[in-house]
Image: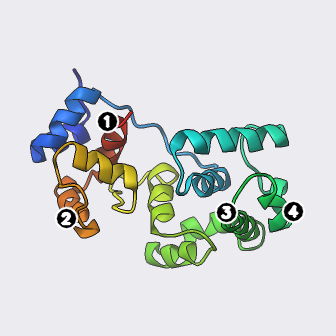
Amino acid sequence: MQYSKQEQYLMSKDVQLKKIIISNKHIKITRPTENYYDSLINLVISQFISRSAAISISNKLLLSFNANIFKEEFFENLTYQQIHRLGLTKNKAKSIKDITYHFINEDFRKKITSLPMKEFDRYFLSIYGLGPWSLNMFKLFSLGDEDIFSSYDAALRRAMETSGMLKLGSDHKDFDLHAMKWKPFRSTASLHLWRSLD
């Protein structure tokens, strides 16, 4: 079995993670998407619900727009109340409306390349409904950051508890501390942890 350098490094650092990687076999890292708007809308949809439920809602919405990806013009002229009536919570509808505003009026895409990372983080978190979890997922899947781990992600915590890395109900900081041994490839570790729950 051919493992990537990231996987080999992780297996040398953590016995329990090694077992997960061997069980999963090699995971091919897909190239990050540059459809930033589509990525953010899907992230908002997936907040606080299961992956399967999020996919179902996204597919239903895309079907109503007769499209394969989300675009700014779908929501630009809708009120958040109208977006809410499409089957999303009021908070998610407000978040989608604010994201759409930032893409159309604030040139979100340009800020990714023009702002220093800390300033971009602050800007990102100023958008309604986007918190630390959303920021981490965006960096991992859209920007291709190799060193992302989020203790705010319930599935990651569950995978770490199931594998015996931490006890059930451990504090967030304990998950973060354990994950430090995976630097600088915490993204690959996260992908394997998610896969272990499938």
Front position in the image: 22 or 103: 22
- Secondary structure of residue under mark 4: loop
Helix, strand or loop at label 1? It is: helix
For the N terminus, which image quadrant?
top left
Residue beneath the point at 51% across and 79% down: 122
Residue hosting label 3: 92
- First reached walking from the N terminus: tag 2 or tag 3: 3
Q: CA distance from mark 4 to mark 2?
A: 43 Å
- Per the image, the residue denoted by label 4 is 78
Mark 2, Cα crowd under 10 Å, few <14 / some 14-19 / many 20+, is few
Residue 83 appearing in the image: yes
Q: Amino acid at mark 1?
A: Ser
Give the residue pinned by disc 1: 196
Give the image location of residue 195, x and y in percent: 36, 36
- Of 141 and 114, nearer the camera is 141
Q: Which residue is mark 2?
A: 177
**Res 113 quadrant in image:** bottom right
Type of the residue with mark 4: Leu
Which residue is found at the position 63% from the left and 74% from the top? 128
| Type of amino acid under label 3 | Lys
Query: Counting residues from the N terminus, which is met first, the one under dot 1 or under dot 2?
Result: 2
Task: Answer with the quarter of the image where residue 114 lies.
Answer: bottom right
Residue sitting nearer the eye, 183 or 57: 57
Measuring from the top left, give residue 29's x and y in whole percent. Answer: 40, 37
Whole-number angstrom distance, CA of label 1 to CA of label 2: 20 Å
The residues tagged by marks 4 and 3 sit, at their Cα atoms, a distance apart of 14 Å
Relative to 153, 73 lies left or right: right
| Outermost front residue | 168
Q: Residue at x 69, y 66 (%)?
A: 99
Q: Disc 2 or disc 3, which is closer to the eye?
A: 3
